[in-house]
Amino acid sequence: MTFKENNKVRGERTRGEMLEFIRQYLCEHGYPPSRREIGDGVGLRSTSSVQKHIDRMLADGILETDAGTGSARALRVPGMRYVDTEPTILDRYLESERKRIMEEMCPYDVPWLEREMGEERLMDKWCPFECEKCWGLPLKPEEELDE
């Protein structure tokens, strides 16, 4: 293998490592890593080397960018689904409805203070929904409560 071929293989391997690092970072943080973070993640000290690899990946279609947004970190992996960390209005509505329905389905219409006091009549019951009506406190059998 010639020096030029060896360099090509090494560059492809580095770009593959960078792509994997960017994917992982996006999944964990919800936004792309900085050039320095990419370099640290794949063992490159020079941010200009990182940028050259990114430019190559952009040209090859391995990465996409939203450079027009004004963000230097605007990198995307084509085909990757992103999870928005901020709940939408629909998410908040669905969560409130889920809680409301769970409370309606709860078989134990017990005030919180009564539950907190540990009324004996509740000891053998278990709320399968852990709803806010039961304050998420499980009503376990007595032998499990003693642990």
Image (cartoon, grey):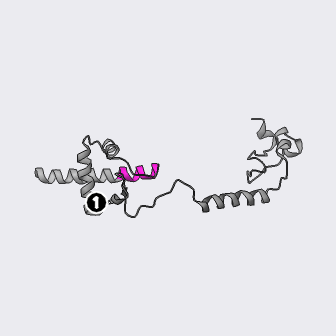
| Residue range highlighted in magenta | 20-29
**Residue at far left of view:** 2
Residue beneath the point at 30% across and 44% down: 39
Estimate how packed mark 1 is, as few (under 14), some (14 to 19) or many (20 or more) residues with alpha carbons within 10 Å: some
Viewed as shown, does residue 136 lie left or right of 40?
right
Of 74 and 80, which appears nearest the observer? 74
Residue beneath the point at 37% across and 63% down: 78
Which residue is identified by label 1?
Answer: 58
Viewed as shown, does residue 69 lie left or right of 118?
left
Dot 1: element = helix
Quarter holding the C terminus is top right
Prevailing secondary structure class for the magenta stretch in the rendered image: helix
Whole-percent x and y of residue 143? 79, 39
Image height of 90 relative to 12, above or below: below
Whole-percent x and y of residue 146? 78, 35
Whole-percent x and y of residue 139? 79, 46
Of 40 and 94, which appears nearest the observer? 94
Q: Any magenta on residue 144?
A: no
Residue beneath the point at 63% across and 58% down: 92
Of 45 and 140, which appears nearest the observer? 45
Whole-percent x and y of residue 63? 32, 59
Residue beneath the point at 39% across and 51% down: 32
Q: Any magenta on residue 26?
A: yes
Image height of 23 relative to 40, above or below: below
Name which residue type carries label 1: Leu
